[in-house]
Image (cartoon, rainbow, N blue to C red):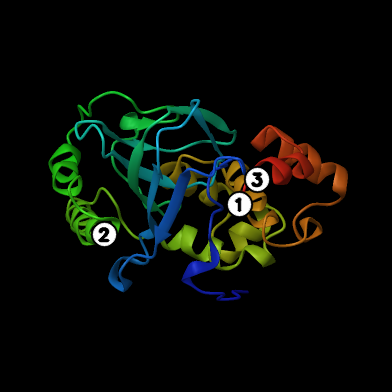
Amino acid sequence: MENNTGEDSHSPIRDGIEKKATDVRYIEASPPEHLSRLIHSFWELKTESTLEEDFHLHAVPDACVNILFNELEPEVAGVTALRTTFEVLDLGRNFHYVGIQFLPGVWQGNRAEIFDSYVGEPYKGSLPLIEFNKKLVSLKFQEKQPVMAQLVEQLLEQKCVVPNETTRRILQNLDAIHDVRDMAAIVELSPRQLQRTLKRTTNFTPHDLLKVLRLQQSFKQHYLDFYSDQAHYIHSFRKITGYTPEKYRKKFDV
């Protein structure tokens, strides 16, 4: 039943950056091959100059977990993730962040440390985030990537991140999944086993995970590939992003 569409079948859209925000730059880079089952990308978000007004990032759920580093305040770092609805983050007029975006189901660290809102306080958890951020701040983005890869390798040794075969197979076969029963069949589990497995490894129910993944895919394929009709699509899109599809695409650079 597998389509085997490849490791990169889950390619989340970037969070909403308004089209008028011409002095805000976002770039991302692929991880080294040996970490490709753990990481979707390394990324950087920064201002090119001081903005005239506060910038608001419209964060959209993608089932990923990120480690975030504030390059202007090296002690500020954190682990972030959204559930099933958007969050608007006020980043101010001058900012510089870099981060690591992990594929769904990979993060197995302390869930109590995960933020679903703005990260503005010094990191106080047990991970070596401040230590690594102090190495990052003086480097260009390309030079930061090997350092972030070193952190991931350390987290892998500590089993804070692990490859997740269940979510990998789901992501590779999204086009063949129309409901939770299809999802369970793809990974060769009963629906009840799938429920337990996903809750333990992703903190999502199968239904909520499918809802988020469908939304992400709808940015790249025709919505009728994933929704029964246009009304269902618009309702789900607005509930997750806060906008209708038309208004979202008019406002944000996607």
Q: Please, what is the three-letter code of the amino acid marked with disc 2? A: Gln
Q: Which residue is found at the position 45% from the left and 30% from the top?
A: 116
CB under 8 Å between callouts 3 and 1? yes
* Residue 67 drawn at (x, y percent): 32, 43
At x 86%, y 42%, the residue is 231
Amino acid beneath label 1: Leu
Mark 2 lies on residue: 145
* Label 3 to label 1: alpha-carbon separation: 6 Å
Relative height, residue 198 to residue 189 (above, below): above
Left or right, 87 with reference to 103: right
Residue ID for mark 3? 211
Residue 213, label in figure = 1
Residue 189 shows which numbered tag?
none
Kindly state the secondary structure of the residue where label 1 is placed: helix
How packed mark 2 is, by other alpha carbons closer than 10 Å (few <14, some 14-19, many 20 or more), is many
Q: Which residue appears at 55% of the width and 68% of the height? A: 172
Image location (x, y in percent) of residue 228:
84, 52
In the rendered image, which quarter is residue 16 located in?
top right
